Amino acid sequence: MIQYNVTVTIDATIEESWLKWMLEEHIPEVLRTGLFLENKVTRMLSPASEPGYANFSFQYICKDMDTLQIYLDQFAPALQESHATRYANRFAAFRSIMEVI
């Protein structure tokens, strides 16, 4: 199985409304693709965020790289653009792909 991880550093002044949007709109939209088997949302405690920011990790599990590639090709660009437009200059994100052992 493959874990697709998105780590986001968000401006703490919008953290609450952003997290609500992520949990109620963005993540359900990602899951509606039908490509992921499970997901987790975590708030990073260590290392500590820089003052004025909060860090989160969004983890999505899919069955294999082919499935993830479908998501990355067909769905991720629009979903990422939606987030980037809504929260422009208020966040930083990086993505990683891991094999579940």
Image (cartoon, grey):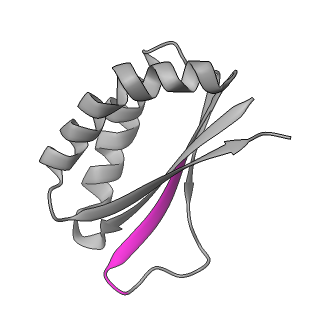
Residue 13 placement (x, y as % from top left) = 23, 70
Q: Give the residue at x 20% y 48%.
A: 84
Residue 9 placement (x, y as % from top left) = 38, 66
Nearest to the observer: residue 80 or residue 14? 80
In the image, is 81 to the left or to the right of 10? Answer: left
Q: Say which quarter of the image contains residue 8.
A: bottom left
Q: Is residue 37 above or below residue 59?
A: above
Q: Give the residue at x 78% y 39%.
A: 100
- Residue farthest bottom in this picture: 51
Q: Which residues are magenta?
A: 51-58
Q: Give the residue at x 75% y 29%.
A: 1
Q: Is residue 78 above or below residue 98?
A: above
Residue 50 in sight here: yes
Judged by its main secondary structure, the magenta piece is strand
- Residue farthest right in this picture: 101
Q: Is residue 67 above or below residue 6?
A: above
In the image, is 64 to the left or to the right of 39? Answer: right
Nearest to the observer: residue 77 or residue 14? 77
Q: Is residue 57 magenta?
A: yes
Residue 36 in sight here: no
Q: Is residue 68 magenta?
A: no
Residue 15 placement (x, y as % from top left) = 31, 62
Q: Give the residue at x 59% y 73%.
A: 45
Q: Quadrant of the C terminus?
A: top right
Residue 96 placement (x, y as % from top left) = 55, 50
Q: Is residue 60 above or below residue 92?
A: above
In the image, is 89 to the left or to the right of 29? Answer: left
